[in-house]
Amino acid sequence: MTKKNTHPTLSQVAREAGVGTTTVSRVINGGERVSPETLAHVRRVIESLGYMPNQAARTLKGQRTKTIGLIIPSIADPFFSSCAEAAQAIARNNDSLLIVTTTQNDPRTELDSLKVLIRHRVDGLLIVPANSQSPALRDVLVHAAMPIITIDRPLADTSIASVVVDNYKGAITATKHLIDHGYKRIACLTGESALYTLHERIRGYRKAMETAHLPCILDASVKDYKSAEYAILSLLDGANPPDAIFSTKNSTTIFAFEVLQRFNIRVPDTVALLGFDDFELASTLRPSISVIQQPAEEIGRRSAELLFDLLLTDRKAANATGARTAKRLTLETRLIQRSSCGCTPPAI
Amino acid sequence: MTKKNTHPTLSQVAREAGVGTTTVSRVINGGERVSPETLAHVRRVIESLGYMPNQAARTLKGQRTKTIGLIIPSIADPFFSSCAEAAQAIARNNDSLLIVTTTQNDPRTELDSLKVLIRHRVDGLLIVPANSQSPALRDVLVHAAMPIITIDRPLADTSIASVVVDNYKGAITATKHLIDHGYKRIACLTGESALYTLHERIRGYRKAMETAHLPCILDASVKDYKSAEYAILSLLDGANPPDAIFSTKNSTTIFAFEVLQRFNIRVPDTVALLGFDDFELASTLRPSISVIQQPAEEIGRRSAELLFDLLLTDRKAANATGARTAKRLTLETRLIQRSSCGCTPPAI
DNA sequence: CTGTTAGCGCTTTCAC
DNA sequence: GTGAAAGCGCTAACAG
């Protein structure tokens, strides 16, 4: 019922409690060096006034803002939202607030987001660079006076630490698995492949195919259902139709599945299907889809942990002057064998 | 190349540019009442120093923080992440930052999140209350000196505005659709139904069934695949097996589908299936799943718009003193007819 | 144990 | 057009 159109301040609390501001400050910061009675009394006043410290004022005093930023392409993408969820948990453990911002993979939006976050003086930053090569981004990042960790994609020519997935090895595993099944003509469906991760996956596919002396069949034309239909049907109607498809990204895998399903092309008998990146109903579809699973949750968790390590160690030296070389943490993927590649169907 | 272990300040810019702080302030706020030359010069200095205004200092001067908070159960849930994405777009249009926090539907976490957000003095708040009845939450919310809008679930006994989906009507539509198909024994599978939304959906189901003089068959036991299997098999083995299932939530719909698929129970021939809430591969599954679609994106957008309306109108009167009655914006759902209810399969 | 005081970086009168 | 100066709410010496 206290009518506060404005938040009560620390000095109001002090006045009300009949003590100095320092004492109140001590109380809200743990209550060290304050007598039990005073402590209790001040706490009561704080409670009754509904006082909550103003973070802006604290920040201004040079303290940490207790916030870290996370810049991702999209919050609606399960992979990134898992990262975000995990990172938030870590932030919370470290008594910090995670501020998530999205870029839609657009460099301009990315730069804007970054500036906003810097204005808010986040203590550190986790970022999935829209463009691994962008000099503009690199510039701002390198000059930002805070620890930064790159996620999912490294940033070229910097000493910025990064936590990524071993896309290359994952793709090799996928391709080899298909090869081990006996498939000879394995097509690789990649969406627009400008992204670092896609590049790596394609590289892995190539490597595995070459090692097995098999011909690479690459198609980068899939962007939606329609293009997938055209691509796959063309491939299948061609002289040497593929007997397996390795899809390098989630959406492509789904489009491919839909095409195959629509035209009653038997999977895996006529063509096998294996996708990079797991998705929610992959095991519910029939046939269930085999995939290379990425440790999304772990990537978010590990990167956030790493960031707080840097934060606790030495904010100054951690970045910018970049004395130490880029640390890169590479996480392993996992092959999930389901039916679409020719493996046994799962229990359910 | 500038070695800044600390951010440059406005007065550093002023000194460097040989002008007063006022002038610099004017420049970074649009450049009104500053001569063109000075403006250009100061801008150049700002650029070269990589200066970025400290939001904390601005906030302290009584300005808006240019941030709004969004408290949701989970960021990994597609429904809420869609809301978040939409809300973020609106925030961005209003030159603000959206800070998302999750509760896992836990009241304690919710209260903590709320406090953090208040400490950061967000200008306004969007919240999906973990518990529609919580007095503790109501208290903090009512006393918070900021505009607040409740999302997806209203908060009882308050004048807090809310943007919700018409769950009741949606459920009626769903149930009636099943009835129109000729099904007589329609079972309603609801997960744990403490949530407001689930309540409303069940209420809608009841209403529709009673209106048609059909018996209600409710089952609240489904929490995972196993329980779904038990529940559905029991129902089907019973004396009067249902000929249709209305599932009130996403996860339940999927579990039901998996059970039906696993036991080769023909859908919709043996039992039809209709779920509340759409999900990504609903149209890819076979049969494709008919659902009641919620306007997730719209709910996020509209609520954020409403919040900024309040913000621009009158922060003081908008909330707390609660002179005006609760505005409630109720959004309509949409029936998406796919195959599982007995309708014709979609084109693809 | 407790209070006084000086700013943190910025906006904003109010003069010039 | 421009600048000097007074704080915003808080913390951190530095006294007592």
Image (cartoon, coloured by chain):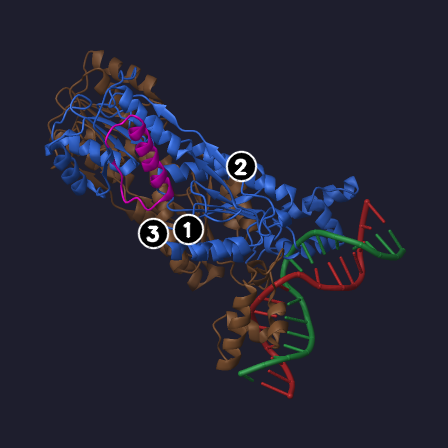
Chain colours: A brown, B blue, C green, D red
The answer to whether residue A165 is seen in the rendering is yes
User: Does residue A191 lie above or below B127 as drawn?
Assistant: above
Q: Which residues fall within the magenta stretch?
A: B189-215
Q: Chain of mark 3?
A: A
Q: CA distance from mark 2 to mark 1?
A: 29 Å
Q: Look at discs 1 and 3 and give the one toward the viewer.
A: 1
Q: Quadrant of residue A73?
A: top left
Tell me the element at label 1.
loop
Read off the residue under disc 2: B90
Nearer the observer, B104 or A186: B104
Q: Chain of mark 2?
A: B
Q: Position of residue A245 (x, y in %)?
A: 21, 25
Residue B187 shows which numbered tag?
none
Read off the residue under disc 3: A301
Q: Look at discs 3 and 2 and give the one toward the viewer.
A: 2
Q: Chain of mark 1?
A: B
Residue B133 shows which numbered tag?
1
Q: Amino acid at mark 1?
A: Gln
